[in-house]
Amino acid sequence: MLAAVELVEKGQSIRKLVAMHGLNDKTLSGYVKVKSSSDSLDNASFGYIKERQVFSESIETEIVQHVLLTSCANISWVNSYRASTSVI
């Protein structure tokens, strides 16, 4: 990918590189955009991790724990209810 970014910087078209190397055009465009804005890809981040994150890490952990606890409690309640109402 880094070699393709360098070729784009030297004047190659993204479409030609995508066709020759089987790369995704959106991915390559993203790498080129980040490299042109910061001159380095060393500390660059790609994807939607922080931009689309709704909850902080601690809040998300609390929500996951709550959902797991309540779903486990509901399952045990349903199982105990079924056991107490079953006809033998």
Image: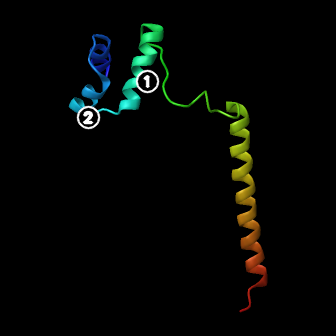
- Report the quarter where the C terminus lies: bottom right
Residue 83 in sight here:
yes
* Figure quadrant of residue 25: top left
- Report the quarter where the N terminus lies: top left
How many numbered circles are shown? 2
Q: Earlier in the sequence, mark 1 or mark 2?
A: 2
Q: Residues within 10 Å of mark 2 (few under 14, many from 20)?
A: few
Amino acid beneath label 1 = Gly
Residue 41 in sight here:
no
In this picture the colour scheme is rainbow
Q: Please determine whether, in this image, residue 14 is positioned above or below residue 37.
A: below
Q: Most extreme residue toward the left, as rendered?
A: 20
The residue beneath circle 1 is 30
Q: Most extreme residue toward the top, as rendered?
A: 39
Give the percent coordinates (x, y) of residue 30: 43, 24
Amino acid beneath label 2 = Gly
Give the percent coordinates (x, y) of residue 84: 78, 80
Q: Residue at x 71, y 45 (%)?
A: 65
User: Quick one: SS at disc 2?
Assistant: loop
Give the percent coordinates (x, y) of residue 72: 70, 59
Q: Residue at x 42, y 7 (%)?
A: 39
Quick check: 42 left or right of 56? Answer: left
* Figure quadrant of residue 5: top left
Q: Residues within 10 Å of mark 1 (few under 14, many from 20)?
A: some
Q: Residue at x 73, y 66 (%)?
A: 76
Q: Please determine whether, in this image, residue 69 is positioned above or below residue 81.
A: above
The residue beneath circle 2 is 22
Q: Residue at x 73, y 40 (%)?
A: 62
Give the percent coordinates (x, y) of residue 22: 26, 34
Say which of 1 and 15 sits in front.
Answer: 15
Quick check: 71 left or right of 9? Answer: right
